[in-house]
Amino acid sequence: MTTSDKSPHLDHDTVRAVADLARLNLTDEEVVRFAGQLGQVLAHAEKLQAVNTADVPPTPYVLSLANVAREDEPAPGLSQEEALANAPEQDRGFFRVKSFFGS
Amino acid sequence: MAAPDLATLTVSGARDGLRSGTWTSEELTTGYLERIRSVDPSVHAFLHVADELALAKAAEADRVRAEGHGEPPPLLGVPLAVKDVLSTQEMDTTCGSRILKGYRPPFTATAVERLQAAGSVLLGKTNTDEFAMGSSTENSGYGPTRNPWDLTRVPGGSSGGSAAAVACGLAPGALGTDTGGSVRQPAAFCGIVGLKPSYGRISRYGLVAFGSSLDQIGPLCRSVEDAALLLEVMAGRDPRDSTTVPEPVPAYSRDLDGDVSGLKLGVPEEYFIDGMQPEVEGRVRDAVEHMAGLGAEIVPVSLPHTDMALPVYYLVVTAEASANLSRYDGVRFGHSAQAGSMTENYRQTRAQGFGDEVKRRIMLGTYALSVGYYDAYYLKAQQVRTLIKRDFDRVFEQVDLLICPATPTTAFEIGDRVDDPLSMYLADVFTLSVNLAGVCGISLPCGTDAAGLPVGLQLIGPHLGEQALLNAAHAYESTTDWHTRVPDPIA
């Protein structure tokens, strides 16, 4: 089902722009499919707009705990070897990344 | 040894047999590993079975017991399984995702560490929807798990591997995680007990993050007493998780009294909806009557914002997930596409490593957080979340606990809902609010439908109300026999 006409927020260009923000390559087939499926979910979410939330504070987190601190005691952390153990590529004790510029 | 019946053995039963010398941990562990070898090819509950490691730990547990220095730790030698979203230094942790294939964490989750410190033996890691995103375990990057009651049906999800493993006796108990129902819903589909503790009760350290303001670890097992036992071992403050609450941990299992006389049980009208399976409503109404017969006072109540839970949840959880999953960049761990440039490597790594549902949720969350939509979606959802939480605050001034269904239907067919995300999300419509409000809930078996599939009863308690919750569940369980039923033997 293509809901891009039903849900004006999610045309194919918007899907591509969001995928770009998320650093996620999508195939053309995925763009079409996700536009429909996400449009459907967002259409369902529209019902929230009918709820009066004037003067209602947001709840990002349910606990009243705030500024939790622990004793600042030095303790051993990961060794360099442990930290690098899962790296796809490493070089002389560093994570190796692809070039930022060019190519 | 007197051979234990692994199909029905509980955590407490396994522990008692070890204490009395009826069996050793090595015998028990060998029994489970053999059973996994014969049954799991049909069920696919496990992603990784730790044969050698488990047998070594079992032998060590037997040695500790034989040496007998003082009181043995509470779970000494008891085999357990762990959902593969919990970090284990000794076993790969994939989260059911191809992007973490072969990933071996450099640390172990606090909850798992506490189970190990209590002497338990880890049999392996169980299957899950990728990054716990799903309600059927079909979103696993390593193939679905099947429901032991009917192999053509889903076990629920996302902790479907743990639920299926316990339901067909591949482990007496297992850990799951519950962000929107992922312990309670599969427990309901598989006819076992699943507990979602209050937010902050169990440390999330080492739990691979999905929705950080909602995630909680919880036990799946064959009895309420087992859930209490595992909870008391895992719960409590952890300096490595600043969201753990400082309140002391009661001896939940010791204080299970099964006395509900005078207990006020609220029946929320919004949890009995059009479109739910009539047999589910019927069995749950029977259970309400049963509790009344045990002396509980039944009070009709209302949680008026219940129908907002689904949209609130899917905006909040995807926003949190899209942020949490930005760490999968192909640089420090996990799959790397080895593309030419940095940015293109991110894009291709994530395109290749993530499955459909994870991509959808990253997209939805990124959209809800993006400029121009933040206020209309993410902020609005957080405001309505406040109203949902206030519903619970208000209702728990009137009643002690809530009683309602865990799911609107029994287990559905594999493949039925995979192409329709919204219908898949509806499987969690009765469990989501509990996570949004941060309160605790438990699912336990209360009957079967015409096809013989289990129906789950849900009890909900206030924040840190686990003792009353477990007591009421124990009262129901100890006066009914649904929890003693097991699926027909497989293979």
Image (cartoon, coloured by chain):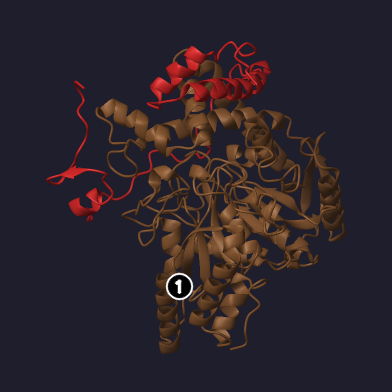
Query: Measured from the top left, where is residue B297 in percent x and y?
Result: 83, 51
| Residue B347 relative to residue B124: left or right | left
Residue B44 in which image quadrant: bottom right
| Type of amino acid at the residue the image marks with label 1 | Gly
In depth, the one of B77 and B302 nearer the eye is: B77
Which residue reaches farthest left? Answer: A92
Q: Secondary structure at mark 1?
A: loop
Q: Could you tell me which residue is drawn at 63 percent across and 22 percent down?
A: A40
> Position of B166 compared to B306: left or right?
left
Determine the residue positioned at 48% across, 12% down. Answer: A13
Q: Which residue is identified by label 1?
A: B119
Chain that bears disc 1: B
Image spot of residue B123 (x, y percent): 48, 67
Q: Is residue B407 above or below residue B386?
A: below
Q: Is residue B462 above or below residue B65?
A: above
Q: Is residue B400 visible?
A: no
Q: Position of residue B489 (x, y in %)?
A: 70, 68
The chain coloured brown is B
Q: Quadrant of the N terminus of chain B?
A: bottom right
Is residue B427 visible to us here? yes
Relative to residue B196, is residue B93 drawn left or right? Answer: left
Determine which quarter of the picture holds residue B89. bottom left
Q: What colour denotes chain A?
A: red
* Residue at left offset 44%, top offset 37%: B354
Q: Is residue B216 left or right of residue B109?
A: right
